[in-house]
Image (cartoon, rainbow, N blue to C red):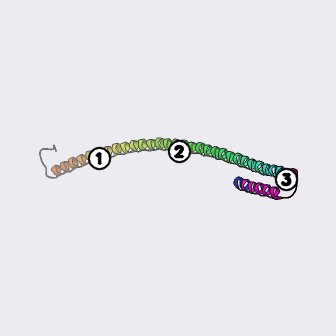
Amino acid sequence: MTFIKKLSISLIIFISMFGLTACSDKEAEEAGEKVEETVKEAGKMTQGAGDKVNEMKEDASKAIDAAGEKVNEMKKDASKAMENAGEKVEEIKKDAGKVMENAGEKVNAMKESVSNKFGEMKKDAGNAIEDACEKTKEGADAKDDGC
């Protein structure tokens, strides 16, 4: 029962008892005792309602504190996750840089190898042309041996 309901019931009982005692044929002293007893009962009910409100307030305060602690814990966890993600990104960047550097070295090595092979092929082609020229001049009995 809520505090307002208990207070309303207490007031209704108080007014009813007061009305009944005022209308009765008994002596004024008995009526006063009944009123006093009714007031005490109403006071006890009001005190109980107040205690319940205080208890509810304490429970709400504890729940709010617990929620605040949970939010702080979640915030710390999120912060750690962000920090770990940042570290992972840095690792990936370093690894990617190493891969790019290695790829550049391999491309340069391949370029040098191809360049050397083309140089050798050019030299071999020149030698083959010179050999063919010399054989042709020999076969033609040419006086000039130079090619």
From the viewer's side, name the closer residue of 35 and 121: 35
Say which amino acid is labelled 1: Phe
Magenta-drawn stretch contains 26: yes
Quadrant of the rendered image containing residue 13: bottom right
Give the residue at mark 3.
Answer: 31
Tag in front: 1 or 3: 3
Mark 1 vs mark 3, CA separation in Å: 128 Å
Residue 114 located left or right of residue 24: left
Which of pointers 3 and 2 indicates the residue nearer the eye? 3
In the image, residue 75 lies at what x, y percent? 58, 44
Q: Quadrant of residue 19?
A: bottom right
Which of discs 2 and 1 lies nearer the camera? The answer is: 2
Secondary structure type for disc 1: helix
Q: Residue 20, position in %: x, y? A: 81, 58
Q: Position of residue 35 (x, y in %)?
A: 82, 51
Left or right, 44 with reference to 71 = right
Type of the residue with mark 2: Ala
Residue 8 sits inside the magenta stretch: yes
What residue is disc 2 on? 85
> How crowded is the residue under tag 1: few (<14 C-alpha within 10 Å), some, or many (20+)?
few
Q: Please report the residue visible at 22 percent of the width from the left and 48 percent of the height from the top.
A: 131
Specify the principal SS of the magenta part. Answer: helix
Mark 3 residue crowding within 10 angstroms, few (<14) / some (14–19) / many (20+) = many
Which residue is labeled 1 in the image? 118
Q: Which badge, 3 or 2, is on the more N-terminal residue?
A: 3
Query: Position of 88 compared to 129: left or right?
Result: right
